[in-house]
Image (cartoon, rainbow, N blue to C red):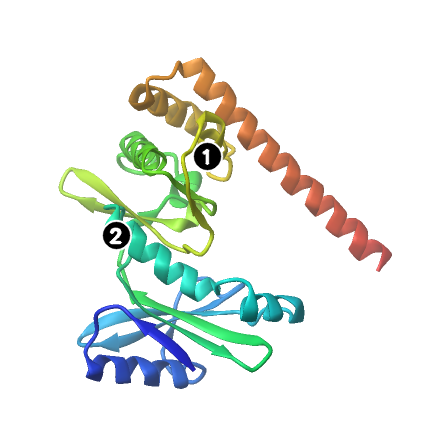
Amino acid sequence: MNSVFNIASDKEQKSIDNFIKNFANTGKVYGNQKRNTIKLFELNEENVNIKSFKTPNLFNQVVYRFFRKSKAQRSFEFATKLHGLGIGTPQPIAYYEFPSLLLFKKSFYASEHLECDLTYRELLYDFNYPDYDTIIRSFTRFTYGLHEKGINFLDHSPGNTLIKKVGDGYEFYLVDLNRMKFEPMNFDARMKNFARLSKFKNMIEVMSDEYAKVSGEEYLKVYEAMTQSVDEFRSNIERKNRLKKTFRFWK
């Protein structure tokens, strides 16, 4: 077992070690367990959020063992970098890896557990959510801030931004961080970063309007580019789904 910690006392590190060792049989299951398993553990009267990443396939076990950082390590390092850039994300605590001599097995990422009021996903299903327009515009300004700081969040999708109401405003926190690049972002890259967020015209119009205001770009240019990115993403999803159905039929 390899582990790397952010600031934590020896006593806290031992507690988290125990959480990891007994992960399968302890802790409170949290959120969607479709790909990875997330559990909450109490430490010093606060919750620690621990994500257990699915064991990679055999090919990727070799890749992660020798050639690429694990998802847990990337999550930890990206969270640390985001904090340094003033971007909201739950405080990173530690990551754990379980390699063998030739293969990579399990990995875990531990962070503070952040309670939120909603995620961006709720806005896709409730157009009458209180402060709807304000939240979308605030979120768009937050995304513009990411772009200005050279943060290309490749998983910028509806469930990966936590939203907290603070006073009359809103704060945003990124989660699921293992796919991210830090690089200058041109206009096309910025617009593609909106592709996963919504297929609804009314939301695209609001995001385009706010992004045009903060960036100084023309509204029509932003709207057309954002719409094209969304349409291309949706087309790719539909094509993949058709291929899956065809494969299952012939199988």
At x 21%, y 82%, the residue is 10
Residue furthest toward the right? 250
- From what the image shows, is residue 40 above or below residue 205? below
Q: From the top left corner, tell me how far across and down residue 33 is, in percent.
A: 49, 66
Is residue 32 left or right of 216 when viewed as pictured? right
Q: Residues within 10 Å of mark 2 (few under 14, many from 20)?
A: some
- Say which quadrant the C terminus sits in: bottom right
Residue 84 lies, in percent from the top left, at: 24, 50
The residue at 26%/46% (across/down) is 85
Please rate how many residues cluster around mark 1, counting C-alpha atoms within 10 Å: few if below 14, some from 14 to 19, many from 20: many
Please report whichever mark, 1 or 2, sits nearer to the chain's N-terminal start.
Answer: 2
Q: Secondary structure at mark 2?
A: helix
Give me the C-alpha separation between circle 1 and circle 2: 22 Å
Residue position for label 2: 83
Q: Is residue 241 left or right of residue 246?
A: left
Residue at horizontal 49%, vertical 27%? Answer: 188
Frontmost of labels 1 and 2 is: 2
Residue carrying label 1: 194
Residue located at (34% from left, 72% from top):
4
- Between 88 and 199, the one lying in front of the other is 88
Amino acid at pointer 1: Phe
Tell me residue 152's x, y (percent): 42, 41
User: Is residue 113 positioned above or below 191 on the image?
Assistant: below
In the rendered image, the vertical position of residue 185 relative to residue 121, given as above or below: above
Q: Amino acid at mark 2?
A: His
In the picture, which quadrant includes the N terminus? Answer: bottom left
Q: Position of residue 139 (x, y in %)?
A: 32, 36
What element does badge 1 sit on? loop
